[in-house]
Amino acid sequence: ANKALMADCGTELARLAHDNRADLFYEAAVGGAIPILRALRTSLAGERIHRVIGIVNGTTNFILSKMSDEGSTYEDALAEAQSLGYAETDPSADVEAHDAAAKVQILSSLAFGTPLVGEAIAREGITSVRSIDVEFARRTGYVIKLLGIAERIGEHGVSRRAHPTLVPRTHPLAAVHGVMNAVFVEGDQSGPLMWLGPGAGGGPTATAVLGDVLDAARNRVAKRHDVPFTVDDRLYAVDEGSVSSIYYVSVDVLDRPGVLAAVASVFGRHGVSIQSMDQSGFGDEARLSFLTHHARNVDVRATLDELATLEAVDSIGACLHVLDGGN
């Protein structure tokens, strides 16, 4: 199943299928053998879904698992993924989150009724994740995963994004290792639900495709056809800058008196409240690692821009989202 084709042209394909009383099935586009699209289309069709969170790219999950579980560097983990056939020679579609972003759009169309018209969504890859970030996550009770997220904001707003995220080790998604995929759904009446399984490979893909073929055959015998999804015209894509999240931010600075206070004051000027701070030194420099309280994306970005202008700041390290019960 071509997930990029569905993400770009799914609404038009659904219209053509409906006009010609034909079926449009694409279960293998997301999650391999995991029947998540069928579940959203049928079992959860009457549920008010609040959020869908997925580990939907096996390549990046393999790389991040190697970094977390075995202490591999990003470069070594990527090389191993390529040697095993999990990553292409040009891995950009995976590691830059293009693949995950397309799958988020498909999940969102079924969960909320957003159109599939090739609209760009917020996307960040894993190439900036370093071993020091993985170690910080481990020490503070998190693990880093590339997540695809679609969530309802208010009554009619929808946020869709794909980015590396610090996931609490107590969350079910934290236990998804290697090339496995998982999708976590939060519904109004259903509560939390999760599907887990291999997201790629000949066997899992064949299972999903065969299921679609059998559904199409049953519909032909019954002289009916399924509606792939319906678009809710009331929905709108929220400004991602206004979306609130907890953040992990790391900054490399000169290790001298007054620097921490100067850095903290920049956070304060932009309304970003610091939840906790960790400092580690190396020579004449130190790395300051912060967990914030909930803050708007636009305010965190403004904080980073100003921090980069400070004379004592050598470089901005990472800026990653942190998953909790409300973001």
Image (cartoon, helix red, strand yellow):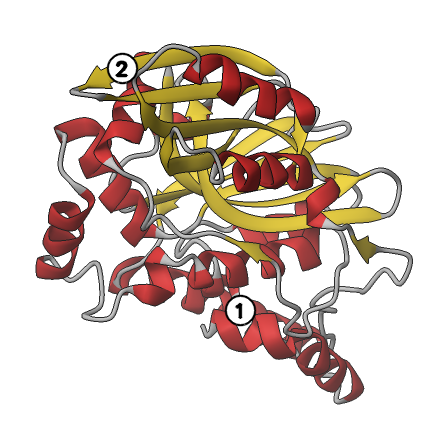
Front residue of 28 and 282: 282
| Image vertical order of residue 70 relative to residue 47, above or below | above
The mark found on residue 26 in the picture is 1
Which quadrant does the C terminus fall into?
top right
The answer to whether any part of residue 325 appears in the image is no
Image-quadrant location for residue 11: bottom right
Q: Is residue 146 left or right of residue 241?
A: left
Which image quarter: residue 177? top left
Q: Secondary structure at mark 2?
A: strand
Observer able to see residue 29: yes
What residue is at 57 percent from the left and 15 percent from the top?
274
Marks 2 and 1, the one that precedes in the sequence: 1
Query: Which dot marks residue 259?
Result: none
Q: Amino acid at mark 2?
A: Ser
Numbered disc 1: secondary structure: loop
Q: Nearer the viewer, residue 45 or 128?
A: 128
Q: Which residue is mark 2?
A: 280
Q: What residue appears at the point 79 percent right and 87 percent down from the top-left corner? A: 19
Residue shown at the point (61%, 54%) measured from the top left: 107
Residue at the outermost bottom position: 20
x and y, in percent, of residue 48 in the image? 79, 39
Residue 91, image x, y percentages: 27, 65
Which-is-in-front pick, marks 2 and 1? 2
Q: Position of residue 135 (x, y in %)?
A: 25, 23
Which quadrant holds residue 67? Answer: top left
Report the front residue among 223 and 275: 275
Q: Amino acid at mark 1?
A: Tyr
Q: How many marks?
A: 2
- For mark 1, does the 10 Å Cα neighbourhood hold few (<14), some (14 to 19), or many (20 or more) residues? some
